[in-house]
Image (cartoon, rainbow, N blue to C red):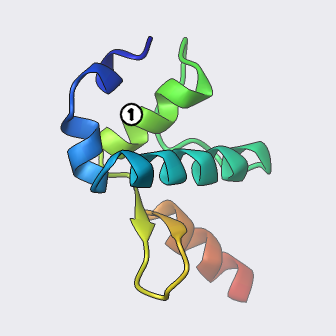
Amino acid sequence: MIEALKSDEVVRKVGGRFKLAVLVQKRMVDVAFGAPLLVDAAGKTIMEAIIDEVLDDKISLDMSSGLVEVSAEGEMAESETAEDE
């Protein structure tokens, strides 16, 4: 079992268990389609790396537009800028 999930810290960071589940699922889809992990994943499963991303404030849920989206600090903004050029 992932040790970080034994405490409520990761749940509180996201705002609840259901929001955490949505965030992890959406991030797993992003990674499956080629998005890079934002933490060092050496010796970790993808799930463990995603939980580390949450704990390190690298990803969060963006619900301001009415849609639930994963927003990554720095990395996503840089890649979107590169696509626009």
Taking the view exactly as shown, the residue that stands out farthest to the right is 33
Image location of residue 48, percent across then percent down: 48, 25
- The residue located at (27%, 56%) in the rendering is 15
Taking the view exactly as shown, the residue that stands out farthest to the front is 18
- The residue located at (55%, 67%) in the rendering is 76
**Front one among 15 and 37:** 15
Judging by the rendered image, the residue that carries numbered circle 1 is 52
- The residue located at (39%, 34%) in the rendering is 52
* The image quarter in which residue 6 lies: top left
Q: Quadrant of the C terminus?
A: bottom right
Image location of residue 20, percent across then percent down: 42, 47
The amino acid beneath tag 1 is Asp
**Front one among 53 and 79:** 53
**Looking at the image, residue 8 lies above or below residue 21:** above
* In-image side of 40 versus 55 (left or right): right
Q: Quadrant of the N terminus?
A: top left
Image location of residue 30, percent across then percent down: 68, 53
**Looking at the image, residue 61 lies above or below residue 51:** below
Q: How many marks?
A: 1
* The image quarter in which residue 81 lies: bottom right
